[in-house]
Image: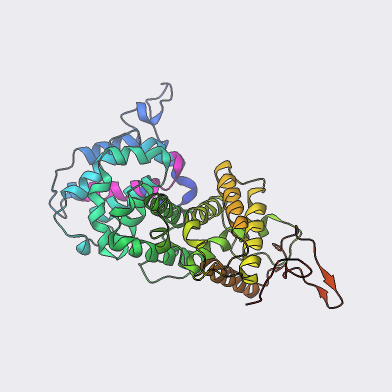
Amino acid sequence: SVMSLSFLEASITTMLQHSPVPDGSDPMPPLHNSESLIRILEKLLKNAPAVPKSGSGKSEGVRWACGLIKNLAKSEENASLFGKTDIPKCVVGNIRNTTAPPSRWTSNSLEDFSLFVILNLAQWPVSRQALIDAGAIDEIKPIMAEGDLQGLKATMACAFLGAPWSDFPDGGSNAAKSISELMTNIIEKKGKDGQYAYGVFKLYTATKAYRDLCCAANSADGNAGDSNTKVLAVPSAVALCLQVVSDLVLAADDEINGGSKYVPDVKSAEYSASAVAYMLPAILQAGDPPRKSIQSEKACGEIATMLTQYANLAGTSSAGKESALRAAEEIKAGSGSARPILEISHESWTQYRKREGQPLDQFLSQEKGIEVDESGPLDFLPCVNSESQCTIM
């Protein structure tokens, strides 16, 4: 069946190109051919009754059409085709017209598939605008408060669609918690059954949602402080973002033994680096009262070096490079004063690297020049023989 084929990642782009023509005719691109798979799916959705009788043949057809679209929309190439049809409008309409509350939506129901289609199309720039034009944010915003799997999907979709920070319930804390938990589950390959299990979502989807949340919070903070980014800049989440970026850096260097068992993709690393950049107002908040700290100095040096190494990788996109270098500059500039969130995040990231047996000297700043005395290098004590008055905390 077409549905089961659509679970194979490799076959989904070829399927949507399916555009049969009579023998001897010239091939036609799928959007120009009313008999192509995409136009047939669109017709099914457009001709569906507004409130189909559950279990009727017509409702089953529409439901499986949405299930198929959900699987096909995982590819950016397919999403660009879907974005040029009325399918985005139809799936938003399915959510608008349903009478069942989200807590009652069963897995694989029309509503469940439709919300999944919105989520999958929202993450690609090529199809995102069609959903915004169809009024998707207003329809899915109320679902965020659900807190279960539907709530998680609605939250990620709202983040992708650029919903303002004020749209996220509870000052954004639900969104922050559920998406950072999802990132952890994907990386550690675990998850509650049917909930945030790692097989359901890709790491690049979760990290992109986190980045977009960080962007929304950062915009809401404006120049007025860090109260919103603080909700997201929990040390465990910051450390996770650092880990994704540094694992990619290690994976890219053939000389290193002890790279990560989990090699992230370039997109996930880019989104994680950008998330860190957006969270900086909170990450770099100085301790109260302000004080000097060697620990912070070391953390600033290593994280800035790691982000710079990431920016210089051949595969890093220009957006990733720009975010990482900007963040590295700001972090370097913050060196010297105690910055509690940064220190705890750095400690947690370092513990991960120890557990994985990764080389801990990879990101030690080479700029300082290594001070040597009889007992060996003291590269992590930047104030040896220097004028600055440091206290070791």
Q: Is residue 169 magenta?
A: no
| Residue at 76% over, 68% down | 379
Q: Nearer the viewer, residue 111 or 320?
A: 320
| Residue at 61% over, 49% down | 325
Q: How is the image coloured?
A: rainbow
Q: Is residue 184 left or right of residue 35?
A: right
- State whether residue 338 is above or below residue 211: below
Q: Nearer the viewer, residue 195 or 19?
A: 195
Residue 40 % position (x, y): 29, 36
Residue 326 % position (x, y): 58, 48
Q: Is residue 355 left or right of residue 176?
A: right
Q: Which quarter of the rendering shows the C terminus?
A: bottom right
> Is any atom of residue 16 visible in this view?
no
Which region is colored magenta?
Answer: 60-77
Q: Nearer the viewer, residue 210 or 345?
A: 345
Q: Taken as a whole, is the magenta stretch helix, strand or loop?
A: helix
Q: Is residue 71 magenta?
A: yes
Give the total of numbered labels.
0
Q: Is residue 298 left or right of residue 175?
A: right
| Residue at 39% over, 35% down | 81
Q: Nearer the viewer, residue 40 or 111?
A: 111
Residue 67 % position (x, y): 31, 51
Residue 132 % position (x, y): 30, 41
> Is any atom of residue 278 visible in this view?
yes
